[in-house]
Image: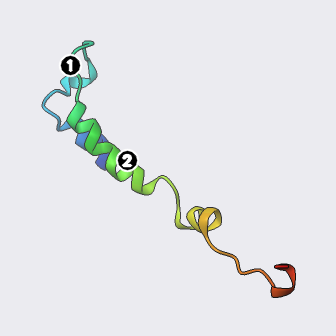
């Protein structure tokens, strides 16, 4: 996945080998590289642990 993200930045016409001025940067390549990053940031186990539902015993729900 990281290789794909690096390639998205390198294929941006404004990449310039990594040397940028304050006014020019590979904005579109960086935007594309972030997309899979957002999807892969958390694993399924982490998502389930954070947002999964756990059924409580009926006696404990009072």
- Position of 58 compared to 34: left or right? right
Residue positioned 61% across, 71% down in the render: 52
SS at mark 2?
helix
Of all residues, the one furthest to the front in this rendering is: 62
Q: Which mark is residue 61?
A: none
Image coordinates of residue 35 in percent, x first then y, are: 32, 49
Label 2 vs label 1: CA separation?
23 Å
- Position of 55 compared to 24: left or right? right
Q: Nearer the viewer, residue 46 or 60?
A: 60
Label 2 or label 1, whichever lies nearer to me, is 1
Residue positioned 87% across, 85% down in the render: 59
Residue positioned 63% across, 62% down in the render: 50
Q: Mark 2 packing: few (<14 Cα in 10 Å), some, or many (20+)?
A: few
Image coordinates of residue 56 in percent, x first then y, are: 77, 80
Image coordinates of residue 30 in percent, x first then y, are: 28, 36
Q: Which residue is mark 2?
A: 2
- Point out the tag, 2 or 1, that comes first from the N-terminus: 2
Q: Which residue is mark 1?
A: 24
Q: Mark 1 packing: few (<14 Cα in 10 Å), some, or many (20+)?
A: few
Q: Nearer the viewer, residue 13 or 48?
A: 48
């Amino acid at each position: 996945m990281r290789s794909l993200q690096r390639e998205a930045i390198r294929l941006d016409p404004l990449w310039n080998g990594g040397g940028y001025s304050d006014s020019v940067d590979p904005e579109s390549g960086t935007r594309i590289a972030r997309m899979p990053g957002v999807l892969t940031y958390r694993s399924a186990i982490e998502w389930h642990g954070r947002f999964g539902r756990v059924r409580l015993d009926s006696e404990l729900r009072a």
